[in-house]
Image (cartoon, grey):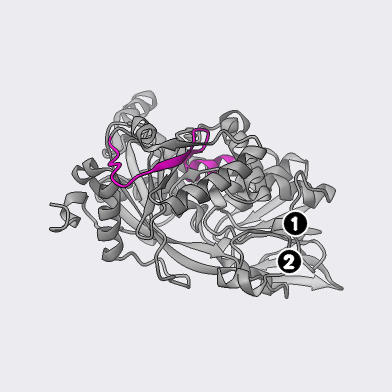
Amino acid sequence: MKGKEVEEDKKNTIVCRCEDIAWTEVEAAVTGGITDPEELKRFLHVGMGPCQGRTCGRLTARIIAQKTGKDISNLKSTGQRPPLISVPIREFLGDRDE
Amino acid sequence: MSKTFDAIVIGGGIIGTAAGYHLSKRGLKVLLLEKDYLAAGSTGRCITGIRQQFSTPATIQTAMESVRMFRSMKEELELDVEWKNSGYIFLAHSEDMVEMFKKNIAIQKTFGLDVEFISADECKKIVPLLDADGLIGGAWCPSDGQANPFLVVRGYVDGIRRNGGEVKIASEVIRISVEKGKVRSVSTSGGDTYSAPRILNAAGPWAKNVGALAGVALEVEPDRHEALITEGVRYMGVPMLVDYRKDGGYFVQRVTGQFIGCFTPEKKVPGFSRESTLEFLVEMSRRMCRLIPAIKQVAVLRQWAGSYSMTPDGSPIVGETDVKGFYCCVGMCGHGFMLGPALGKFIAQYMTEGSWSIPMEEFAFGRFFGEKERMA
């Protein structure tokens, strides 16, 4: 593929499906100096949706590695927050409000 | 040989980045050092609320100035920080609360704040989903609001860089040199030393430790608070609802449609812990649903915890310390994000001109924390 087509492809490649973030957006943020996965998560919201990075985590790590030359195995993955998968609030109400 | 700057800021949260931005805007060569990543501390863990409904003059005026700044932040920082004046309602479920809110409103109005005590019916008009059981009314300020703390910090950092300043992450300050009562330089975990005639401690919950590096005692203690956020649903403009009951809490609908909220634990959890608890998740769910029963259909995405930086009297400590050139803007007591833009601007002015925009005695370094205040 020619350079232009690759760029077009990246624009159409969704890295984070939960928050609808394209490859080019992640690349731009990394090029702009956000190279820490935790900071990238907070700035772009990659990994802040229901999947908590299970889908996008590896992709964003790869982009950071490519753009910064860092070894991908040295990149910390972002923290996982409870309840890990999204849970309807009614599940936490028990009998009290039912 | 050490590199020299006009000002060094320690801390990459809202206070440090806002102060750094305003110092750089005044033409100073600024270096900002953050030990972890930007907004890694309290700023990135807050629940995004921005209110002006406070009870003391300096805090009210600072918060009002912050709101003025949030309104024009998109133009100032060339970044949409998701500012929305979605308002705050302090809900009154007892006559004592009515009396307290009305007293605060009277003080707030002397500074020109657009705040009113409204009936329970009027609260329901603003929040149709509200369960008004036991509700007498509320203190409503429509110009209060919300913004995205990550974007605000990012905007300030980009601004510092545009103004010729430097921002370094993963750079912990481990030493501060003081000579003849005057601050001289800082050394980082990476082995670098930087000099400046002005150094600002904006280290949030770590303020006491950073102060100690320069031999300055600061009465700032961290204290854990938990929070949660739900998935997004249709934006209905639910303002920040502050339930003032003993088992209350506060939550708001973000412009993304998500509900974000927390409550103040009855028993304090001192220290740097950021552990989340199942108790919080269960309790917060109950407390949110008591006010808006429909929330039970929404799913929780995440919960987390962060530190409040508490002072004995609940007000920040802002000013020059007893080491010349060593300033502090610390002890935000849970209000850093909302007070940050204005305090950053105020301290930048003080560090360059030696003057304040508003009377700041309330926040003075070295003020006496009496026994009564300590108990509160």
On the rendered image, what quadrant is the N terminus of chain B found in? bottom right
Q: Earlier in the sequence, mark 2 or mark 1?
A: 1
- Secondary structure of residue under mark 2: loop
Q: CB of mark 2 within 8 Å of CB of mark 1?
A: yes
Q: Chain of mark 2?
A: B
Q: Is residue B197 magenta?
A: no
Q: Residue at x 42, y 70 (%)?
A: B273
Amino acid type, mark 2 = Arg
Is residue B257 in sight in this rendering?
yes
Region rendered in magenta: B129-155
Amino acid type, mark 1 = Glu
The residue at which mark 1 appears reads as: B361
| Relative to B119, B370 lies left or right | right
In depth, the one of B85 and B106 nearer the eye is B106
In which quadrant of the rendered view does residue B264 lie? Answer: bottom left
The residue at which mark 2 appears reads as: B367
- Secondary structure of residue under mark 1: helix
Residue B330 place in picture, x, y as percent: 63, 60
Q: Residue at x 75, y 54 (%)?
A: B7
| Relative to A69, B75 lies left or right | right
In depth, the one of B306 and A80 nearer the eye is B306
